[in-house]
Amino acid sequence: MPYARLLPPILLVFSNVFMTFAWYGHLKYRDTALPKVILASWGIAFFEYLLMVPANRLGSTVYSAPQLKGMQEVITLLVFAGFSAWYLGQPLKWNHWAGFALIVAAAWLIFLE
């Protein structure tokens, strides 16, 4: 399958958008009751799983499980950085970027053969 290398990261990006909204989107609505927020987050997370599970299943044909996890972490950080600045109005500071860079370096090590 020629798309086997490309499709998993694409699915992971979209999955992470849903995940980030499920985990952090409610922070803009602190006055909303916690049970409502939890139910809404579960509903959003359903769509995350609809993309995450196929991404990992298809990705496992060309990537190892540690490589998929490393890729997932880097994608999560990139999606979160945009989300934090755009949606929450909390742009990342230099130390956040530095910490994220260390995680990216760790993911890069995972891909070394």
Image (spheres, grey):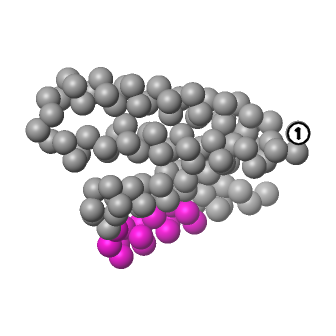
Judge whether residue 59 can be spotted in this image.
yes
Q: Residue at x 43, y 30 (%)?
A: 45
> Residue 4's image quarter?
top right
Q: Nearer the viewer, residue 76 or 14?
A: 14
Horizontal relation, residue 60 to residue 50: left or right:
right
Horizontal relation, residue 91 to residue 108: left or right:
left
Residue 104 painted magenta: yes
Q: Residue at x 47, y 55 (%)?
A: 79
Horizontal relation, residue 47 to residue 70: left or right:
left
Horizontal relation, residue 4 to residue 53: left or right:
right
> Residue 90's image quarter?
bottom left
* Residue type at numbered disc 1: Met
Judge whether residue 66 can be spotted in this image.
no
Instruction: Please provide percent x and percent y for residue 52.
Output: 58, 34
Q: Which residue is mark 1?
A: 1
* Image quadrant in which the C terminus is located: bottom right
Range of magenta residues: 92-105
> Residue 55's image quarter?
top right
Q: Residue at x 31, y 28 (%)?
A: 40
Residue 7 painted magenta: no
Q: For the view shown, which residue lies furthest in the right direction?
A: 1
Instruction: Please provide percent x and percent y for residue 32.
Output: 15, 34
Q: For the view shown, which residue lies furthest in the left direction?
A: 31
Q: Residue at x 31, y 44 (%)?
A: 25
